[in-house]
Amino acid sequence: MKNIRKLIILPIVLLILAGCSQSVERADRTITLIQDNMTSIINLISEIQFNEQGLQGQFEEMINSEQELQAFQNEEAGIFVNINQRSEYLDQLEENRTSLVGLREEIQAQSESDGLPSDQVTQVDQNLEQLLGHLETYINDYRTNLEVEQQLYQSLANTDLDYTQFFGLFDQISIITTNNQMNLEKVIEFVEPINTVLINLKVYLANLQEAS
């Protein structure tokens, strides 16, 4: 009789262990994907900032060329390539943001079904909510500002442009840059808290795997 019970209990235990293992793997995969998207967001933001820093040199190169201000009629000029590149980075940022929206829903569900620590998942969820909202604002405002920025640079080729208008353009560009930076700071504020909790969750899952 005891042997029969052992034979019955053993498959049940194995099923439970297999289920736990799958839950841990599923949760680990979700956390890894969130981390990957966070890393991609930081890299893309760094590329955008790198391009911003290159604008001054590209502007000087164009204005010192033989065409001078007429160089700003050329849509293939360095500054406009720079603007297009930043626009592409924004598209990629939007893809990462969309992925994080879905992953946020996944980790919420896994908190209930896979036994993730609810307090840590709540921290991730709340910080992700803030980051996603600020990231949406950053992307949308930056896109609008890029359009204005392009128009401002193109207007430099206007032969009727006077000195007051010329320097006024740079005041407008400075306002745009400040707006983008303020939006970015709100995004960056939530990056470290999210990454810290994700690392803690990874450690928690690693300990579960060792225990099983």
Image (cartoon, rainbow, N blue to C red):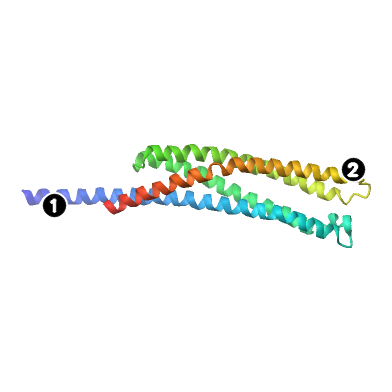
Q: Is residue 143 left or right of residue 102?
A: right
| Mark 2–mark 1 CB contact (< 8 Å) | no
Graded by Cα atoms within 10 Å as few (under 14), some (14 to 19) or many (20 or more), the crowding at tag 1 reads few
Circle 1 sits on which residue?
7
Three-letter code, disc 2: Thr
The quadrant where residue 121 appears: top left
Q: Is residue 173 left or right of residue 13?
A: right
Three-letter code, disc 1: Leu
Furthest-bottom residue in this view: 66
- Reading the chain from its start, which is encountered first: label 2 or label 1? 1
**Point 69% across, 40% down: residue:** 179
**Point 73% across, 47% down: residue:** 146
Camera-side residue of 89 and 50:
50
Graded by Cα atoms within 10 Å as few (under 14), some (14 to 19) or many (20 or more), the crowding at tag 2 reads few
Furthest-left residue in this view: 1
- Element type where label 2 sits in the image: helix
Q: Is residue 100 left or right of residue 176?
A: left
**Point 62% across, 53% down: residue:** 46
- Element type where label 1 sits in the image: helix
Mark nearest the camera among 2 and 1 is 2
Circle 2 sits on which residue?
164
* Cα–Cα gap, marks 2 and 1: 90 Å
Camera-side residue of 56 and 8:
56
Q: Is residue 8 left or right of residue 129?
A: left
Q: Position of residue 17 (x, y in %)?
A: 26, 50
Q: Position of residue 137 (x, y in %)?
A: 63, 39
Q: How many numbered circles does the render carry? A: 2
Q: Position of residue 81 (x, y in %)?
A: 74, 57
Visible residue check, residue 212: no
